[in-house]
Image: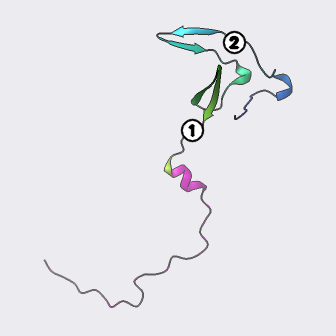
Amino acid sequence: MLKYMSIADSEVPPSRRVSLFRNGKNQAVRIPRAFELPTKEAKLTKDGDRLIIEPVPDQASLLDVLAKLPQLEERIPDVDAGLPELDDVEL
C-alpha cells in the first residue's frame, strides 16, 4: 500500500476515526487533510472487512512523456544516401 502524508509522519497518527455519510445511493468517507492523497483518482480495494484506498497516478500526456525522454546523442542516418535522383513526373 502506498503511503502518502502531507504533514510530517511524526505529526500524523497511524490511524484516525472518520465519519461516513451518504451521498445519494453511495456511502462516502471524509478523508482528513493529514491523509490527503496527491491525485484526483484513487483505487478502492476490499480485503475482508478492510477497505484500502490507494492513489492512482494522474495520467501524463504524450507530450509530457516525450519531454522527459533523454536527448538522443546519435544522428539519424540519411536513408536516401546513395539512391539515384528521383525523376520529375507530370500528371
Q: Amino acid at mark 1?
A: Asp
Mark 2 or mark 1, which is nearer the start of the sequence? 2
Residue 91's place in the image compared with 71, above or below, is below
What x and y, as percent, mark residue 33? 71, 20
Which mark is on residue 48?
none
Residue at horizontal 66 percent and vertical 18 percent from the top: 31
Residue at horizontal 82 percent and vertical 28 percent from the top: 9
75 is within the stretch colored magenta: yes
87 is within the stretch colored magenta: yes
Which mark is on residue 18?
2
What x and y, as percent, mark residue 81? 42, 87
Q: Quadrant of the N terminus?
A: top right
What x and y, as percent, mark residue 66? 54, 56
Task: Label the magenta part by its dominant secondary structure.
Answer: loop
Callout 1: SS: loop
Q: Amino acid at mark 2?
A: Val
Q: Quadrant of the C terminus?
A: bottom left
Q: To which quarter of the image does residue 40 belong?
A: top right
Along the viewing direction, whichever of 88 and 63 lies nearer the viewer: 63
Please provide the residue range marked out in magenta. 63-91
Q: Is residue 45 left or right of residue 34?
A: left
Which mark is on residue 58?
1
Depth check, mark 1 against mark 2: the one in front is: 2
Along the viewing direction, whichever of 25 and 59 lies nearer the viewer: 25
Q: Is residue 78 left or right of residue 48?
A: left
What x and y, as percent, mark residue 85? 31, 89
Residue 79's place in the image compared with 70, above or below, is below
Along the viewing direction, whichever of 63 and 58 lies nearer the viewer: 58
| Structural distance between the alpha carbons of marks 1 and 2 | 26 Å
Q: To which quarter of the image does residue 48 belong?
A: top right
How many dots with numbers? 2
Give the class, few, some or many, for how many residues have Cα within 10 Å of label 1's Cα (few <14, many ≥20): few
